[in-house]
Amino acid sequence: MSGVIDIMNYAPYVAPGLSGTEYQYEEFQTMVRTTLRPLLHDGVVTTQWGRDVKVDDPPTEADPTLHIDEAIAQLDREGCDMIVLACLKMWSYRHHHQLIMDMPEEVVAEAVKVAGDRFIGAAGYNPFRIDESLRRIETFVRDHGFKYVYFHPMTFGIAPNDRRCYPLYAKCMELGIPVGMQVGHSAETLPSNVGHPMLVDDVAIEFPDLKINLSHTGWPWTGEFISMLWRHPNVYGDISAYFPKTLDPELIRAMDRQLRGKIMLGSNGFDLTRCVRELEELPLKDATKQRIMRDNALEFLGL
């Protein structure tokens, strides 16, 4: 299928050198030895963007060099019309007490400037730097055409209904853009209990006109994920970070029924071609697949 929209990807798609430096931190070194163990071979991990990194001696400086032509060529090969580039910000909850990932909005802004018809900018949010974050979000939405904010509350050890997240929701309402966040467990050794999808209940009720995307299926609390999307008109969800053939059977059944207009496809930086192929192989109606691969994202992003 052509015309796919990848709702969940990251800045390294256009600047691969931004990936790899995070493996200097214990959270990522632990992750590749546990939840992402298949990526580790002889002490070397191949990042989602094809960069080989020695886990015990990773790079310490990121390279923000843009590879726009290569990125667009990759989109064309994958049959992908548009891709969301999220500027992920992650904090070391235990070991370092500092940001261990801070993908710069400036890099994504350059990509959007060159090919705004292919790249969708998603600003990040740091709930420990609220005022600074809100100013940056407004700048990149108003001046650089960003259409989304994606953030990762669990890495900061806080729930999405924490008071420090509410200024973000109000700012997104003011700017007329949707917000997205990770729910479910953390692949890294970061707090997972704050990832319960049902913790977004308060937010969905108190901001009924704010479109919210719950990313990464909510596993292992898949039932909560389904409930949130089913009950709230303003809540969507994506299946990124999991190849479709590994999805919970309960979620697959719901995708063809009550969630047909709510689920979106995302690669999380993994193999998008495989994601699409496996989704097409699922026992879903063709109209459902069309919505998941494209139409729901268009509606969610207001495109």
Image (spheres, rainbow, N blue to C red):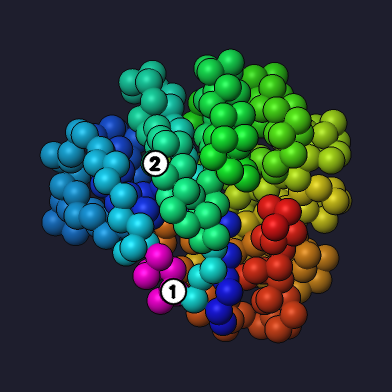
Task: Specify the amino acid type for callout 2.
Answer: Val
Task: Specify the amino acid type for callout 1.
Answer: Asp
Q: Residue at x 32, y 64 (%)?
A: 70
**Along the line of sight, which residue is nearer the eye, 50 or 257?**
50
Residue 34, given in percent of the width and then of the height, sits at 34, 49
Which quadrant, please, contains the C terminus? bottom right
The answer to which image quadrant residue 165 occupies is top right
Would residue 168 be seen by someone viewing this image from the given angle? Answer: yes
Instruction: Say if the magenta span includes residue 226.
Output: no
Q: Please report the bounds of the magenta region as a residue range.
A: 72-78
Q: Residues within 10 Å of mark 1 (few under 14, many from 20)?
A: some
| Residue on which disc 2 sits | 107
Residue 91, given in percent of the width and then of the height, sits at 43, 27
| Residue on which disc 1 sits | 76
Residue 240, given in percent of the width and then of the height, sits at 54, 58
Give the secondary structure at mark 1.
helix
